[in-house]
Image (cartoon, grey):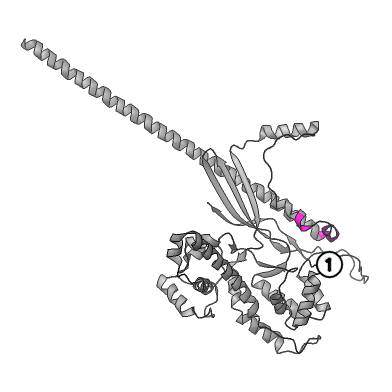
Amino acid sequence: MILNKKKMNNEGVAMLMVISTITLLSLLMFSFKFETQINKIKAFNTTGKYQARLNAESGLHLALIQLEIYQSILNYLLENPNVKQMAPAELINMVWNQPIPLNLELIEGLGLIEKEAMEEIKENFMMEGKLDTTIQSYGNKINVNSLILSSASKYNELFKSRYRGQTTTSSTNPNAQNPPAKDKFKELEARFKELLDNALQGKMDSDEDFRSQYSGLDVDELIANIKYYLLDEGEDIGPLSTQVQSEFEKAGITPKHAPMTSLSELSLLPAWNDELVDLIKNEITVHGKMVINVNTISPAWIRILAPDIDEVNIQEFLKRRNDPNEELEFQNEEELKRYFVDQQWAVEGEFEDRITVLKSAGIVFGIESELFKIVATGEFQNAKYIINAIVAIPRLEKKQKASSTPTTTTTTRTNTPKKPTFEYARPKVLEIFVN
């Protein structure tokens, strides 16, 4: 009996050890299987993100090709002004503002050669997932760096020292009003302030939490922060100068005293943060130059370029420009200058000098859009990757070829159109950021 009991006890212990071992091995197996599934999901997610990124990068390159085609067209039209008259701006802009379809479906009516070409493209088309690209003109965006010009004292003094103390030889109106140049620069600041006011008010109306947090926010303080950061040291930024200076010193931030190169710099300022920047980031830029359309130029700009023009002549000019029968349209600042000089509303040398000064400050006059934003979205399975890029088509001085014609020839060709002195360079990516 004693032996049987010992044998039963040993069998029971062995059974428990077997069950424990099986349980342990099962747990290890399930744990290994779970880890394997997790790693597999991670691998799929990583592959999906990488493929989505490749799709987005492909979209960016595709958009750059569109802009390069647009740049080539602009240069062709510069060389052939007669063709430009027959090509409306809306048609030319379709080169970049119309997305390129990627569905690659055969279209009815294609010939045999076209069908074979499409089949070959579809066979070699290796993109997986989805791709979407959009190109937006940044020509109408507010350049934050233009607030540098809201302090126009140095330009006033410069223009006065060059011309207002001298006697000009052209016919000018001695009774013409000469509003200070600061009026025009204040127009830039007022436009930016209006944008801020509307964005803040719209957000407060729709978001109670935002309203409770920013109800006491002063828009003038936001603008003063930017001006203090951008302007030369010691320049007047208004009544908030002392307060803003104290805020910068308390935050340990040193003003740049130069234009911003990225919108992310706004978030560094004491009165700003990412939430405020996000409200207006789609309406502002820090890249490119401030382009003023020569065909919609405002009276404030006219007074800066032609300080001797009187109000009667300004109204006459606006009336002619708005009259469709007059067909008063300019292609560049040179044509605008020639018109004002011929009307004896401006002094040619002074007009050119003011244009030069404003260009050095980042303000140019023209009609074509030169700054663009590309948004390329790539998708694969559940992954999405978005690339935002700011792209410029720079205007560069054209290199003149040496003429082989003898210099002794004095004949002139009055009917030959004047060749342009500049050309558009290939698109240049200024900034890339990822959502």
Residue 119: in magenta span: no
Residue appearing at x 72%, y 82% in the figure: 307
Return the residue nearer the eye: 327 or 375. Answer: 327
Residue 86: in magenta span: yes
Task: Work out whether residue 299 can be spotted.
Answer: yes
Q: Quadrant of the N terminus?
A: top left
Q: Could you tell me the amino acid type at mark 1?
A: Glu
Q: Which type of secondary structure does the marked residue at label 1 adopt? A: loop
- Left/right of residue 430 with respect to residue 94 in the rendered view: left
Seen as rendered, the residue at the extreme left is 2
Q: How many marks?
A: 1
Q: Position of residue 19 (x, y in %)?
A: 23, 21
Residue numbers of the magenta segment: 79-90
Task: Work out whether residue 346 can be spotted.
Answer: no
Q: Quadrant of residue 118?
A: top right
Q: Position of residue 18 (x, y in %)?
A: 23, 20
* Rendered position, 132 above or below 257: above
* Rendered position, 363 above or below 108: below
- Left/right of residue 180 with respect to residue 318 in the rendered view: left
Task: Estimate how packed mark 1 is, as few (under 14), some (14 to 19) or many (20 or more) residues with alpha carbons within 10 Å.
Answer: few
* Rendered position, 371 above or below 223: above
Residue appearing at x 80%, y 31% in the figure: 112
Residue appearing at x 62%, y 53% in the figure: 374
Q: Which residue is mark 1?
A: 327
Return the residue nearer the eye: 154 or 136. Answer: 136
